[in-house]
Amino acid sequence: MKKLILGLLVSVSLFGSDFDDAYSAYEKGDYKKAVKLFKKACDGGYAGGCYNLGFMYNDGLGVKQDYFKAVELYKKACDGGDASGCSNLGVMYKYGLGVKQNNFKALELSGKACDMKFELGCKNYASLKKELGQ
């Protein structure tokens, strides 16, 4: 059991380092490096890495803009417990970017982000709820 916990701590530490390096590269405008490191963190199961990689695909930073890939990555982030991923995925459904437009799915995802105490998710949820007359 101790080995498992130590292994998990080491892997989180490594992915955290990749994430920190990726964010630093992003801040410096080195988008290619940021994409590479966010991908490594995402592939390692770090939901924040998936969210940020999705953002890079959504905006075409360091990669060709690809809404379908952004949706895939936001979903992976959301499924991994990242509230920003859920919120952004909801926006993609709201506007039909990379997915078929679906306000009810957008409401569900915004609600999930709000349940995770993500303020923007709560705002989107309230707005969609009003728009849908609920």
Image (cartoon, rainbow, N blue to C red):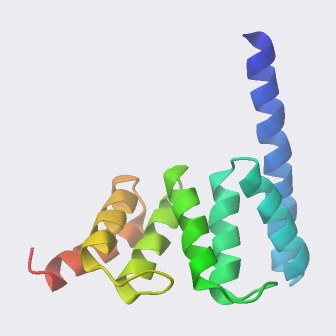
Image-quadrant location for residue 28: bottom right
Kindly identify the residue that appears in the image at 75 percent across and 29 percent down.
8
Kindly identify the residue that appears in the image at 69 percent across and 89 percent down.
65
> Relative to 12, is 99 on the left or the right?
left
Q: Position of residue 19 (x, y in %)?
A: 79, 58
Q: Across the whole image, how many numbered discs are drawn on residues?
A: 0
Q: Is residue 60 above or below residue 112?
A: below
Towards the viewer: 94 or 28: 94
Towards the viewer: 90 or 29: 90
Q: Is residue 24 visible?
A: no
Q: Is residue 48 above or below residue 45?
A: below
Q: Which quarter of the image is occupied by the N terminus?
A: top right
Kindly identify the residue that appears in the image at 41 percent across and 87 percent down.
96
User: In the image as oriented, which residue stretches furthest toward the top?
Assistant: 1
Q: Position of residue 78 (x, y in %)?
A: 50, 58
Q: Is residue 121 visible?
A: yes
> Relative to 29, is 45 on the left or the right?
left
Q: Which quarter of the image is occupied by the C terminus?
A: bottom left
Q: Position of residue 107 (x, y in %)?
A: 28, 70
Kindly identify the residue that appears in the image at 77 percent across and 54 percent down.
41
> Relative to 103, is 17 on the left or the right?
right
Q: Position of residue 109 (x, y in %)?
A: 36, 65
Image-quadrant location for residue 112: bottom left
User: In the image as oriented, which residue stretches furthest toward the left?
Assistant: 133
Towards the viewer: 45 or 28: 45
